[in-house]
Amino acid sequence: MNKKANTMLFILGATLFNILVTVISFLLLFIIYAKFIYDIIPETGRSWSFTLIFILSILISFFLYRYLFKYLLAKIDVEKYFDPLFARKYKKK
């Protein structure tokens, strides 16, 4: 495989990972909310719960993605296996 194929597969895999983590964290937070918190919150606050769960699941996936990406960058030589997404406009002298 060449660098461009590795880059595209990495982007595809990272996107799928991010979506999967978002969905899983959303479902887990919603199950926790439904089992333990739904009866405690008054009806006026229940309408905001879905929005809060959605935002929290996105934040969880963002932070998990950032942590794993930093770990991956520490383990793999990026310039050896991946092609840059954006080419430099000017070369440094």
Image: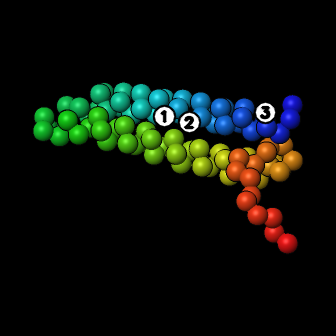
Q: Secondary structure at mark 2?
A: helix
Q: Mark 1 is on which residue type?
A: Thr
Q: Position of residue 60 (x, y in %)?
A: 48, 43
Q: Position of residue 75 (x, y in %)?
A: 80, 49
The N terminus - image quarter: top right
Q: Is residue 70 left or right of residue 48?
A: right
User: Residue 92 sits in which quadrant?
Assistant: bottom right
Q: Is residue 15 left or right of residue 43?
A: right
Quick one: label 2 or label 3, which is nearer the N terminus? 3
State the residue position of label 2.
18
Q: Residue furthest bottom?
A: 93
Residue located at (59% from left, 44% from top)? 65
- Few, some or many C-alpha atoms within 10 Å of disc 1 (few <14, some 14-19, many ≥20)? many
Structural distance between the alpha carbons of marks 1 and 2? 6 Å
- Few, some or many C-alpha atoms within 10 Å of disc 3 (few <14, some 14-19, many ≥20)? few
Q: Residue furthest front?
A: 90
Q: Mark 2 is on which residue type?
A: Asn
State the residue position of label 1.
22
CB within 8 Å, label 2 to label 3: no
> Which label belongs to residue 5?
3
Q: Is residue 24 left or right of residue 40?
A: right
Query: What coloring was used for the rendering?
Result: rainbow
Out of 29 and 16, give the one closest to the viewer: 16
- Few, some or many C-alpha atoms within 10 Å of disc 2 (few <14, some 14-19, many ≥20)? some
The C terminus - image quarter: bottom right
- Residue 84 visible in the current orientation: yes
Out of 7 and 22, give the one closest to the viewer: 7
CB within 8 Å, label 1 to label 2: yes
Residue located at (62% from left, 49% from top)? 67
